[in-house]
Amino acid sequence: MEDIENELKQEFDFLNNFQHISYKEKIVRAYDELTSTDPNKIMKRGREEWDNMLWGIYWGKIYVIWANTWVWKTTFVNQICNNVSNQWYRVAKYSLEDRIEDIWKEEIFYTVNRLMWKAGKKPIDWISFVNNTSFDEIKEYVYRACEMLIEKNNLVELDKKKNVNIDEMIRLMEEEIEKGTKLFAIDHLHYFDMPDSKERHDIQIQNVMHRINELARKNNIAVILVAHYRKWSNNDYPDYDEFKDGSAIKQVANIIIQITRDFDWDTSKFHITKIRWPIKPKVLETTFNLSTFEYGFKKSERQLKSDKVVV
């Protein structure tokens, strides 16, 4: 009896997951999705340059952010997550590399400095902040920063006691999908626990990419993945071969954004090197403010309207 039930389940799963459709059916489904799309409900990055070029963060897509260390790719991803959460989309941000307390302290630090910068005050340095030697001088900015960050109540993060493997990540994401989460950010790809030491690392990374891609496609969510180079790159036009497990990642990603910076630390370049759309790849160039730890992109009108507080 159990064998028959298993066979019926397998047959049901097959029929549920695979079917042949005609060309007409394909066009009708595409037309229905196109005409039912509400442009006001598309997630935006919140920066004018990005919104004008890529227009939105589309569901069912994987966006890979690739860069060296100390190019502030995490800062860029955090800006996107905060902007999207301010648009009242639920966002899950999984920081796999650092202690979550350190990440949160950094967010308070950057927000304090933005507030001080706006008020015409000299921003505080990191050592004084993290050592708590100047709290009395900046406490009003710390309180306000904490209030502002708490207001981002559509942003959830992962508290973990061990490295996460892909099976655990899929389960965590499925739990959040049921709660209505539409955007996931994973920082970063090479911090997954890879228990199978017999299998090549790039094959394991490829499996991670395929599992996440399938989840995104199936549940109509968007995923931002941060990845590292395998060596320091000085190229103005970075090559995929410079990435850790580059060939395994680039095949699955829908959009790849590579970040480089000049040696003067002032200028950052965003290379859109892969787009699975009829859009010409471009390079966006901007400054990076070391005092406020913000890229110099202009906030879009939609983001200004959605922000509860404009810093």
Image (tube, rainbow, N blue to C red):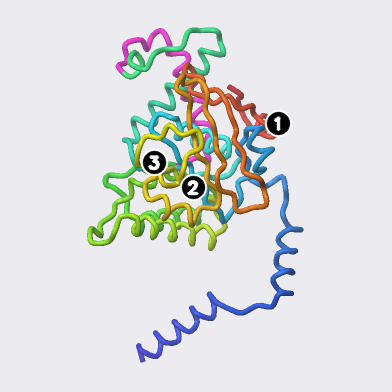
- Residue at 56 percent across and 10 percent down: it is 119
- Residue at 69 percent across and 38 percent down: it is 52
Kindly identify the amino acid type of the residue bearing the numbered disc 1. Glu
Is disc 3 surrounded by few (<14), some (14 to 19) or many (20+) residues within 10 Å? many
Above-or-below relation of 220 to 13: above
Kindly identify the amino acid type of the residue bearing the numbered disc 3. His
How far from the left and from the top, in percent, is residue 100? Answer: 35, 35
Is disc 2 surrounded by few (<14), some (14 to 19) or many (20+) residues within 10 Å? many
Q: Give the range drawn in magenta.
A: 131-156
Numbered circle sitting on residue 301: 1
Q: Which of 281 and 127 is in front in this view?
A: 281
Prevalent SS, magenta region: helix
Per the image, label 2 sits on a secondary structure element best described as strand
Question: Which residue was labeled with disc 2?
Answer: 184
How far from the left and from the top, in percent, is residue 140? Answer: 47, 13
Question: Which residue was labeled with disc 3?
Answer: 228
Q: Does the magenta stretch include residue 140?
A: yes
